[in-house]
Amino acid sequence: MKKRLVLLTPGPTPVPPEALELMSQPIFHHRTPQYQAIFGRVSQELKKIFVTKNNVYTLTSSGTGAMEASVVNFLSPGDKVIVAHAGKFGERWVQLAKQYGMTVLEIKAEYGRAVAAETIAETLKKNHDIKAVYTTLCETSTGVCYDIQLIAQATASSDAILIVDAISGLGADRMPQDEWGVDVVVSGSQKALMLPPGLAFLSVSDKAKKKMAEAKCPRYYYDLRLYEKALTSSDTPFTPALTLVLALEATLKILLTNGLEAHLNDTAQLAEATRAGVKALGLSFFAKERPSNGLTSIEVPAGVDGSKLVKIMRDEKGVTMAGGQGSMKGQIFRMAHMGFIGQEDLRIGFSVLTETLNALGYRCDAQKVLDAFNDVAGSKKVKQ
Ligand SMILES: *Cc1c(COP(=O)(O)O)cnc(C)c1O
């Protein structure tokens, strides 16, 4: 019998069968009307996920490639930027900006907390030479979703542009780009967008486009001006990951079946049901405020070896959850409920989790946990 494999990590996430099937088609050439028709449609539909009128560029890279693109396209070496961070992925912005010679003002919060929008606003008022504010929608390492709407109010009244890593957040946590005034949104394929790893997406406001024209950082593969130009003929400057683009058309269809809002509400409901399950387990949340709807981060109970917990579930029971990164290793584990992950996956996840916790000496009642999960998952009341 084939082993049960349930993927509950916050990237990669499970890929729907329709998308898997499209990826097994014979390869055809991309400089063709056949491909351009597909890429043209996909590029339009992506705007509905970003909730923007801006073009959305599709890059062949993991999410970090689009993060790098959003440093080199908008800045010149020596520019002053704010990075607001409270987790491993936010720290990546610091490393990237420093690598390109930027002067970085860090606004930090503790892991498990959200960054303070007020501090960003004050810093912008005191420093008129700040070119950009870099932050994160869903900080996947801690499971916290930052208040991007409030941060965007601060950048809107300054010269700085707001650049948000929404690699895991887009399609799970609500962030209408144009309505909130976010200048650059970065995303990736393997999280809430339900695809395998390999594509990254980027959408750029007019305010950011002006900075793009002045930026002096060297750039070649990630020169977004090339992507903008190619889009006018539904094309990309370099060979696209054609297979993934085919699959993207299928996942966008699923995400937009009843509109983005309906999908976000379903995800919010799964998140709330998961949190109810975790409470019934008697465990504590690692996110102390603003938990993301894409994943739940949970503290490993005292006396249990966190690395062993994740390893046993994965290697012996076929359920993969994510452990902690950096200093959080062994201290927390993370359960995703974004994208194509559904109620049934989470029920299996909870039953394997209770079984394993009991085996490791932490007493908990599987039925109580499932009842708590089902109570919320089955109701139709949750609104994001
Ligand atoms: C997954 C993730 C990344 C990294 O993306 P890669 O695709 O691994 O390059 C960056 N930021 C956040 C918030 C993520 O969740």
Image (cartoon, helix red, strand yellow):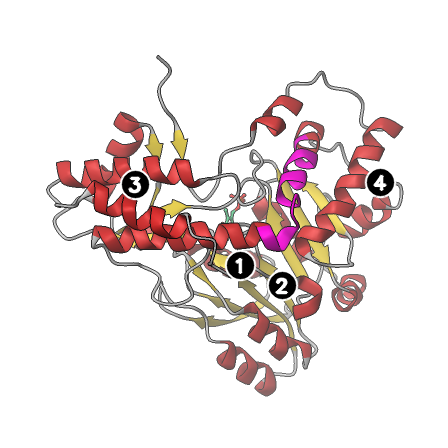
Number of other residues with Cα within 10 Å of mark 4, as a class: few under 14, some 14 to 19, many 20 or more: many
Mark with earlier residue (4, 2):
2
Q: Which residue is mark 2?
A: 163
Q: Amino acid at mark 2?
A: Ile
Q: CA distance from mark 3 to mark 2?
A: 36 Å
Disc 3 vs disc 4: Cβ atoms closer than 8 Å? no
When the figure is inspected, residue 302 is found, relative to residue 113, above or below; the finding is above
Mark with earlier residue (1, 3):
1
Q: Can residue 333 be seen here?
A: no
Q: Amino acid at mark 3?
A: Phe
Residue shown at the point (69%, 42%) measured from the top left: 59
Q: Which residue is mark 4?
A: 234
Please tell me which residue lies in front, 77 or 54. 54
Number of other residues with Cα within 10 Å of mark 2, as a class: few under 14, some 14 to 19, many 20 or more: many
Q: CA distance from mark 4 to mark 2?
A: 25 Å
Mark with earlier residue (3, 2):
2
Number of numbered discs overlaid on the protein picture: 4
Of the two numbered discs 1 and 4 in the rendering, the one whose residue sits closer to the viewer:
4
Type of secondary structure dominating the magenta stretch: helix
Q: Can residue 90 be seen here?
A: yes
Number of other residues with Cα within 10 Å of mark 3, as a class: few under 14, some 14 to 19, many 20 or more: many
Picture quadrant where residue 282 is located? bottom left
Q: Position of residue 192 (x, y in %)?
A: 54, 45
Q: Position of residue 109 (x, y in %)?
A: 40, 70
Q: Amino acid at mark 1?
A: Trp
Mark with earlier residue (3, 4):
4
Q: Which residue is mark 1?
A: 93
Element type at mark 2: strand
Q: CA distance from mark 1 to mark 3?
A: 34 Å
Which label number is shown at residue 350? Answer: 3
